[in-house]
Amino acid sequence: MCEDVDVAKRQDKRAEVIDLLAVHFLDTGLSDTGLRRLAEVAGTSDRMLLYYFENKEELVAAVLTHIASGLSASLTDMFGNRPLPPSTLLETLWAAAKSEAFKPHLRLWLDLAANANRGDPLLISIAQQISAGWIDWMANLLDVPAAEKNATAALLLATVDGQLVLFPGEIARGEAAIQQLISLFKHWSQAVSVC
């Protein structure tokens, strides 16, 4: 019985730490993730962090996965589950990317991607996992033939990510490219429906 209570307390504290550090990561990115600093933000000691998590890598992975899950839940609320043509999905994704509510998530995503591209094996794994999750999520929403779902979803994700990389701090500058792709998708959709 006591062991069950200890496990429950540990899980509760672990969840609390993840929530606190998620706010920190969204505010500061990945540059301020030393174990002592994370412990300070979580209101505990570095030794206790290593009690709740096997190591720093597990802690960082848990926080980033938690943030990605929260973003996915927000996007699911925004989009629902009805099938959407690629043009509509891209238009709505782009509006979300430009919104203030999603800016912290997008900054963190770009920070994660940049650090992963520097060769950090943990961050490579996390970035791949998050990307795969978003592609699957978008593929399930797309109203395109099954054989085209994953490639179309990857194209949409790459398009939005590309605008974020090309125009940091001025995402609206990517508007023309996004509108061009939306127009191409609409034209493609009309051509397919005529056939």
Image (cartoon, rainbow, N blue to C red):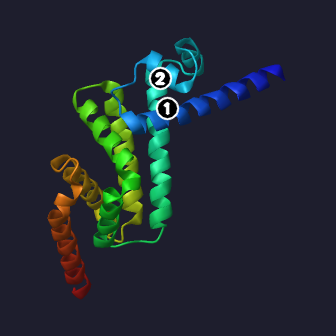
The answer to whether 135 is drawn above or below residue 189 in the figure is above
Whole-percent x, y for residue 100 in the image = 37, 55
Residue type indicated by callout 1: Leu
Badge number at residue 21: 1
Residue type indicated by callout 2: Leu
Q: Quadrant of the N terminus?
A: top right
Whole-percent x, y for residue 34 in the image = 40, 19
Badge number at residue 187: none
* Mark 1, secondary structure of its residue: helix
Q: Earlier in the sequence, mark 1 or mark 2?
A: 1
Q: Quadrant of the C terminus?
A: bottom left
Distance Cα–Cα, label 1 vs label 2: 7 Å
Q: Which residue is mark 2?
A: 38
Residue at (42% x, 71% y) in the render: 83
Residue 87 placement: quadrant: bottom left
Q: Residues within 10 Å of mark 1 (few under 14, many from 20)?
A: many
Residue 182 placement: quadrant: bottom left
Residue extending farthest to the top is 47
